[in-house]
Structures are given as structure tokens and as C-alpha cells.
Amino acid sequence: MQNSSGINLTMLCDFYELTMGNGYLAEGMDSRITYFDIFYRSIPDSGGYAIMAGLEQIVDYVRNLHFSQEDINYLAGRKLFKPEFLDYLRSFRFTGDIWAVPEGTPIFPGEPVITVRAPAIQAQLLETYMLLEFNHQSLIATKANRICRSAEGRTVLEFGSRRAQGIAGAVTGARAAFIGGCGGTACTVSDQLYGVPAAGTMAHSWVQMFDSEYEAFVSYCRTYPHNAVLLVDTFNTLRSGVPNAIRAFNEVLKPLGITKCGIRLDSGDMAYLTQQARKMLDEAGWTECSITVSNSLDERLIAELIRQGAKIDSFGVGERLITAKSDPVFGGVYKLCAVEDDSGNIIPKIKVSENVGKITNPGFKKVYRFFNRDTGMAEADYICLHNETVDDTQPLEICHPHDRWKRKTMKNFRAVELLVPIFKNGELVYELPDLRDIRTSCAYNVSTLWPEVKRFDFPHQYYVDLSPQLMELKDRMLASYGHDRA
């Protein structure tokens, strides 16, 4: 797999993945089957949920894993790797199994969102790139979803390419923002590659290029009569920008019978300016003229503008979305949870830490989401061992794994498995959905969360429970290490 710079992304791995692989081969452990979970520990912005994203790029990466001769020459030059390991890499491909939560699904801390079952070297090598895509795109999709919800149905466009942290930050960031709910992007290549609708009008430089603001607006209207959105704050929004826009609309669009057009503001007191601009446009008969605003917006600023009665139809959100500026790290991790012995028995593994939050859940697991049959709303997630099943025709008592006195009896619920097969024996068995379908699914899935979970401030903590069997296994393994129960 190569990116636009011609780099083989198989080599986008932490160096220790290669040194451990070399060691596994030397110890005869290269074929030992291992299980790794990807999960995350805390929700960005102290929110109530996050959005799963990045799976399509992970699939593309896994399907194209290989080492070129150039890569092997580089590794040989490091004088660290045995010839047998370099020979192993020449025919390297992924032969394992992967399960994942589909993109656009709300996800919660501690639950597996991707599980890898594969020979040790293969599974270890996936760590860096899988975390890179999952962490980045889930971060941006989550931030975009917060921002779009704050807009209360108004369109949000992603305008952040020039402030993004690198090429992938812009390109796949726009993709993730679309999953989260944005209506489009300013990033043209994201439209070309993924079908994220690209949109844009003009910069201040367009206005400055002409002898007058009015001439700039007339020229733009003539060039794009059916997409005439004019940037009105180059000089003075209310004294010249909006009046000149109205003059241009009257001169160019009105004779053509075009009533739909727009203005954009990129500075100033957005609440006051949009209220006054709306009044001026309506009085001039341009009631269908939309108003778009941009300039360092985020979910809290948008919510405040709406509270103040700003007359805004759509928002362009840049740096605070594409970098998730308020909380820019998504804490996804990749942890060994089990291995198989020579007879195929699954042996659970656990990571123990003085930091309780870093203690892992052992074993090969699956995750159920419980939906109330009457309301259709998500009530809780349930993590259990892979050989457990949930009978959703019977009541089930669940409790929080860290606050076990918090108990809840589930009745009249429907249990849905979240992790679906993606790869089987190295072959893709999952049909990647269209990006628009992922976006639609995301909107529906978020709608199944109670409003209390979606609050921006102090959201309700959604239940993510461990089954009694998994909890007993974890307690037993912790006790064997001399630690108190987590």
C-alpha cells in the first residue's frame, strides 16, 4: 500500500513491531495465534459518546500489506534483523481474522471496537496504522457530530484543510467530518477520492482584485448565477457589503428569475451582523438569500449564536473541527487480550497497572448493544466472552464494572452484536458501505441515544457492563497478580 508520496504504508509502523517480529520468529512464536483489541479510554471534550470511523482505510491497508525489496534492503542495513526474518517479510501478507464495529456507530470507553486474531508477527505489525486511522477519524467524526448537533439542523461545512495537521489530516479528516454530519467540505481531493461534496465560493482576494466591491460581486454573479454566494465583509459588512450584494443580485440575478443566492460573513459580531443583514435582504425582496458564517467556530460558539437569535442558515467550520482543537487526542489503544495454545485453546491475557484505568479486560470477547423494544433507544452495551450468548427474551441484570452497586435490570430489550466480521483467513468478507450510507447510519444511530447521553455538559454515563463470566475471569486474573479487584 502506497500513499501519494510513494511510501509503502506497511512501513508506517513503530520500529518495535519489527524488532518484536524478529524476536517472535527467533523464538518459534511467529505462528502462535494472538488476539488484540482496539478500544479507547475516555471521550473527547468530556462528551457522552464517540463515533467509530476509519475502518475503510484500515481495510485498504490490510488488503495491501507487503514489504518491497527496497524496504527489506533498508531493514537489512540496520544490522538488527536475522536473515530468516527478512526472508519471512518477502512473502508477507495478512492471513488472520478481523472483527470491527461499523463506521458511524456510537462507541464507548473500554469496549472492543476492533478485534484482530492472527499469527503474532502479523497482528503486532497492524498496531500503528490501525490506531492512526481509528484515532484520527474517530476524533474528527466525533467533533463534527458535536458541532452539527449544535447547529440544530442547519448545514455545517468543513472548511479546515489549510489548518489541518498534514495531508491526511485534511483529506481523511474531511471524510470523517462528513460521517459525523457535515454537509460537505472545501477540500476538493476529498470529493474526488471519497465523494464528500466539495463546495466553495470566493476569498477576500477576489473582491480585492476588482476596482470596486460592487464590480467584484457583479462579475461573480455573472459567472455563477446559480451559485452566487458573495463574501460581504471585505470592507464593511453593513455599509457596503450587503448593499452591494443586493445591487448585484438585482442587476444580474433578478432579470434571470433567480431567487436563490447567498452571502457569507467571515468576521465581526455574527449575531448582530446577521440579524441586520437578514433585515436588509428581506426588505429588498431577497427572502431566499441564505446567510453563511465562518471564522473560528465550534459547537459552543454556534450554540451561543443561535441562542442570541443570529440569522444564520449554514456554518463553515475550519480549524476547531479539523484539528479537534478543544481536545485533540483520541486515546485508542491496541492490547493483547488472548493467545491460543498448540491445541487451539484460547488463553486469556491481561495487562495489570497501578493505574486502574489501564487494566485491560482479558479474553476473546464480543459486544452487544441493548435496545428497548418499545422506544428503539439504546439502553446499554454488554461485553462478554466470545462463547457467551444473550437471551433477550429474558430479564438480565447488569451493573457498572467500576461501580458495581449501580445495577439495572434489562427487560423488553433487543440485543444486537456490534462487532461484525471484516476479514476471514486474510480475505475480505465485509462489503464496505457507501460513504453517504455511513453518514445516514451515523445520524440514525446517534438518534437512538437518549438526550441525556448527548448533553455537552455533564452527560449521563452510558452503561457499558461486563458479563458476570467476564468479570469473574478478570477478578481471578487480577487476584493471581496480587492486585485488588478493578
Image: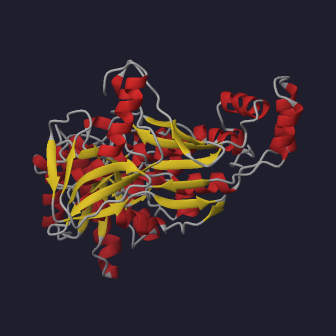
Colour setting: secondary structure
Say which of 452 and 422 sits in front: 422
x and y percentages locating residue 456 in the rendered image: 20, 42
Instruction: Identify the residue at horizontal 17%, vertical 71% (top origin).
Output: 285
In the rendered image, the residue lying farthest to the front is 343
In the rendered view, does 83 fall on the left or right side of 290?
A: right
In the rendered view, does 395 fall on the left or right side of 436?
A: left
- Residue 9: tell me if it is visible: yes
Q: Is residue 74 above or below residue 272?
A: above
Instruction: Identify the residue at horizontal 27%, vertical 45% (top origin).
Output: 465
- Residue 451: tell me if it is visible: no
x and y percentages locating residue 198 in the rendered image: 47, 61
In the rendered image, which quarter is residue 321 located in?
top left
In the rendered image, the residue lying farthest to the left is 308
Total numbered labels placed on residues in the image: 0
Q: Quadrant of the C terminus?
A: top left
x and y percentages locating residue 221 in the rendered image: 40, 67
Q: Is residue 244 above or below residue 125?
A: below
